[in-house]
């Protein structure tokens, strides 16, 4: 090869190196906080899509399992917990929330992904949506099958979550959940099937989709969230104890009284239909309200409607609250945050209408 050709080859490769370095400098900086769940699960056979141990695989192995993440962002991982999410407590929520808030304040962090079990993912997502004062993308992701199974969904879900967390278009949309190629708002999404990959649904529909690492948006959240919230994780060290009692035929006041005895500051009534309350239970709820326990009517009927105030129950007269369209587990999250700022039912009702 002639010297002049050699010189231009060196020049070209030097230019390539400089460009790729510059490109690397422009790559979004994404932190993955791992908490456990099926996405970190392991089974003994590829045929075990539902029989496995959750919360086994560490975050660095999750990242190594999807090498294509580096095409999307500079990614680093941190193992916050390693638990199945049915074991999440209010203390876990506070610890995770403070960790995310601190990262979001760092100028060298552009987006945050949280890997999480699917059982209570919807609760954590709503909690963070209520208390994080940031516009940076915070994306929660899980999987319905362990990485050891045929057609495992965790790899693509994680790739999609990093894609969403890396995209400037994701900013200001609140806490997001990516599952099964869809982008959901942390406020609305719920696990509606316990054993299929198409498990997560939002009653008012997803916000968008991710296809081959690109986000496609079709709507934006309508309720207050993140930088528009009046709540602040940095001022929260404890959540109010709130419990949920199911409504059904032949219901009795036993559970409600037991929860109040146990220190519940509010009881979410997961009522039949429009949050209806059995005639056998109403007097006990009135008595508990008189003792300062908040009564919040939600519905066991899953998504797509909302509990109407003063319909079959005189909520104004009883000084009760309606959970609007929030399912019982989401209503518990909002009540446990809201009760750190007020004990007035009217104030609680405002919050249930705005968040
Ligand atoms: N036990 C479930 C959990 O950790 C496993 C999962 O689906 O992630 O939520």
Image (spheres, helix red, strand yellow):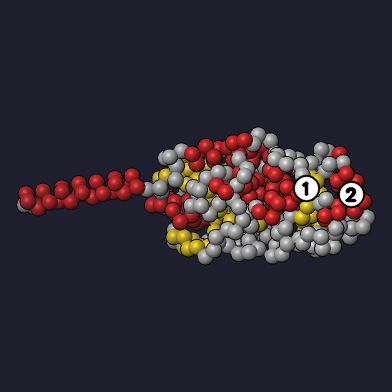
For label 2, count other residues whose C-alpha is less than 10 Å away and answer few (under 14), some (14-19) or many (20+): some
Side of 335 where 17 appears, left or right: left
**Residue 232: x, y in percent?**
60, 40
Mark 2 highlights which residue? 286
Relative image position of residue 56 (x, y in whole percent): 59, 42
Instruction: Kindly identify the residue that appears in the image at 60 percent across and 59 percent down.
Output: 222
Q: Is residue 168 left or right of residue 87?
A: left
Which of the 4 image quadrants contains residue 152? Answer: bottom right
- The residue where tag 1 is placed is 345
Q: Is residue 255 left or right of residue 174?
A: right
Front-most of residues 232 and 97: 232
Residue 206 appears in the figure: yes
**Image point (52%, 65%), residue name:** 218
Residue at point 84%, 41% (across, down): 292
Disc 2 or disc 1, which is closer to the eye? 1
Which badge, 2 or 1, comes first in the chain's sequence?
2
Q: Residue at 26% across / 49% down in the picture? A: 19
Where residue 45 appears, as percent x and y from the top left, is 59, 53
Helix, strand or loop at disc 1?
helix
Mark number displayed over residue 1: none
């Amino acid at each position: 090869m002639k010297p002049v050709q050699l010189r231009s080859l060196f020049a070209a490769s030097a230019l390539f190196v400089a460009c790729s370095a510059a490109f690397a400098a422009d790559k979004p900086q994404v932190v993955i906080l791992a908490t456990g769940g099926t996405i970190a699960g392991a089974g003994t056979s590829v045929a075990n899509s539902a029989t496995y141990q959750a919360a086994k695989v560490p975050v660095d192995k999750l990242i190594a399992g999807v090498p294509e993440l580096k095409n999307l962002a500079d990614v680093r991982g941190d193992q916050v917990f390693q638990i199945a999410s049915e074991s999440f407590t209010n203390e876990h929520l506070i610890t995770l929330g403070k960790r995310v808030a601190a990262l979001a304040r760092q100028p060298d962090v552009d987006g945050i992904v949280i890997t999480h079990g699917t059982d209570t993912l919807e609760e954590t997502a709503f909690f963070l949506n209520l208390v994080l004062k940031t516009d940076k993308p915070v994306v929660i992701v899980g999987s319905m099958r362990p990485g050891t199974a045929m057609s495992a969904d965790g790899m693509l879900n994680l790739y999609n979550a990093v894609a969403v967390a890396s995209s400037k278009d994701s900013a200001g949309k609140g806490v997001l959940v990516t599952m099964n190629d869809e982008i959901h708002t942390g406020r609305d999404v719920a696990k509606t099937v316990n054993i299929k990959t198409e498990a997560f649904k939002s009653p008012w529909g997803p916000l968008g989709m991710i296809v081959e690492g690109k986000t496609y948006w079709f709507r934006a959240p309508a309720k207050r969230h993140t930088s528009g919230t009046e709540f602040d994780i940095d001022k929260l060290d404890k959540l109010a104890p709130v419990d949920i009692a199911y409504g059904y035929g032949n219901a009795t006041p036993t559970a409600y009284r037991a929860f109040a005895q146990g220190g519940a500051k509010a009881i979410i009534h997961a009522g039949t239909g429009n949050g209806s309350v059995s005639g056998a239970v109403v007097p006990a709820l009135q008595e508990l309200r008189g003792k300062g326990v908040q009564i919040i009517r939600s519905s066991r009927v899953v998504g797509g409607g909302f509990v109407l105030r003063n319909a079959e129950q005189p909520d104004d007269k009883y000084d009760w609250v309606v959970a609007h369209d929030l399912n019982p587990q989401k209503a518990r999250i909002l009540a446990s945050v809201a009760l750190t700022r007020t004990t007035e039912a009217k104030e609680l009702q405002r919050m249930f209408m705005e968040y």
